[in-house]
Amino acid sequence: MSPDDSCLIDSLKSFKGRVCVAFSGGVDSSFISWAACRYCEAEALPVFMVSELVPEDDRDWAIKALDGIGCGVMELGWNPLEIDRIRANSPDRCYWCKHFMYSALIRECRSLGSFHLLDGTNADDLKSHRPGLRAIEGLGVQIPLARCGYTKDAVREKSRELGLAAWNRPSQSCLATRIATGINLTRERLHMVDMAEKYLKILGASGKIRVRYMRYGALIQVEDSDKSLLESRWTEIKSGFSGLGFQYVEFKE
């Protein structure tokens, strides 16, 4: 057993009482959920936060990703668009989003008798600019993967060996990241972006897709493998996006 594994197992065993895990269905949260459900001395409960910021496909995927983890999940709804500091979509929105979301999660966990909340932050995350991480650490959320030196590649490899569904899932981000900074977040705009990305997938785009809501309209970003699809069906795409409410659309080459 590698030192990293020993560190993680010892860390999880040190938590007394019920443990909650912030679960998104991604590779990191799936792996820490799997580990917590096996090594924490008391019950470990993954919690999926449901809101307008979560793409429909991500919610569906999260339920499927539980296969092989070995424990159930609780869905917890919250309303970020009711919070001015999130809705305003300022440059520090990610910090406030994580702060209020995890505060709500902590309150719920405590009501269930759990005083430990785990997050899937990995060691690579500590090296990048992540305002949300500052909020997580400020609230006292535990990040055992990062503390035990698990990089993203290490988490993927461990997850592949374990047969976890999320092992090769691309990194995801919430719908708010698609709205240009300074443009207020609304249910309509978030839904437009979500439906636009689903539309491109239905057309056959198979790589990472991002539809950015800009002041002038929609900006599509896809991987090189999907650019020929956009070019060949561009007239159709413009018509489809118009039907979703976008008056102008372009894609980044």
Image (spheres, grey):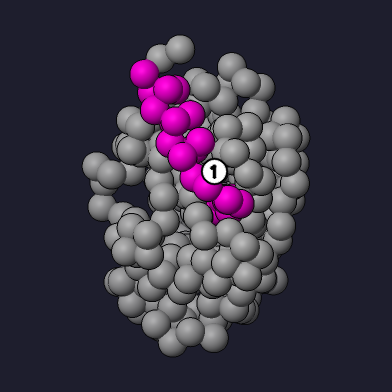
Quarter of the N terminus within the rendering: top left
Q: Which residue is mark 1?
A: 29
Residue placed most toward the observer, 175 or 118: 118
Q: Tag 1: residue type?
A: Ser
Image location of residue 151, percent across then percent down: 37, 30
Q: Secondary structure at mark 1?
A: helix
- Kindly identify the residue that appears in the image at 61 percent across and 74 percent down: 78
- Kindly identify the residue that appears in the image at 69 percent across and 39 percent down: 65
Image location of residue 174, percent across then percent down: 52, 59
Quarter of the C terminus within the rendering: top left
Q: Is residue 35 left or right of residue 68?
A: left
Q: Residue furthest top?
A: 1
Are there few (<14), some (14-19), or many (20+) residues within 10 Å of tag 1? Answer: many
In magenta, the rendered stretch is 3-24
Image position of 237 with respect to 76: above or below = above
Residue 188 appears in the rendering: yes
Q: Quadrant of residue 160?
A: top right
